Amino acid sequence: MIPMLLVNGSEGIGTGWSTSVPNYNPHDIIENLRRLLRDEEPVEMTPWYRGFKGTIERQTQDKYLVSGSWNKIDDTTLEITELPIKTWTQTYKEFLESLVTGSDKQPAILKVSYTVTLRLKMA
């Protein structure tokens, strides 16, 4: 039996403490359990999500940078094929629009003199 908390991950708040445990590859978990049974040190595991094609890069001891996938179709079109883990499509579209239009609190970051077409490819 393997610790399903590590396979499925978890997020929540209990008695004033918040927790966030990412998903890990079951094969990596099993390999680390075998190391522990042989009195060896476990190796560090990177969060893993089945079917995710983007990247997960360690930033600090307990923080990771998760990036989705995209393709440049032509000079004015980007095809976003995968959003970062736990990112909603609508929220991401609003973020992209704010880069071009700006907001009350932050000016536009991107200056474009043509229309940019963003196509979200949903699986």
Image (cartoon, rainbow, N blue to C red):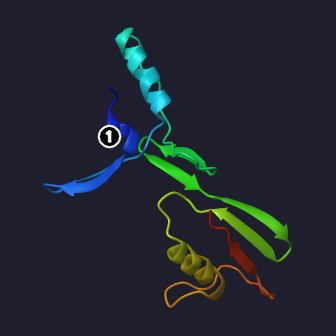
For this view, does 61 lie left or right of residue 101? left
Residue type for callout 1: Leu
Look at the numbered disc 1 and give the secondary structure of its residue: helix
**Residue at position x 58%, y 78% from top?**
93
For the C terminus, the quadrant is bottom right
Expressed as whole percent of the image width and height from the top left, the position of residue 75 reads: 86, 74
Q: Nearer the viewer, residue 58 or 121?
A: 121
**Residue 39 pos. (x, y %):** 36, 9
Q: Place residue 94 in its image quadrant.
A: bottom right
The N terminus: image quadrant = top left
Residue drawn 40% across and 39% down?
Answer: 7
Relative horizontal placement of residue 29, taking residue 74 as reference (left or right)? left
Counting every numbered tag in the picture gives 1
- Mark 1 surroundings: few (<14), some (14-19) or many (≥20) residues within 10 A: few
Horizontal side of residue 98 vs 22, given as left or right:
right
Where residue 67 sits, quadrant-wise, is bottom right
Residue underneath mark 1: 5
Q: Position of residue 81 (x, y in %)?
A: 68, 62
Q: From this viewpoint, which residue is outermost toward the right?
A: 74
Front position in the image: 39 or 10: 10
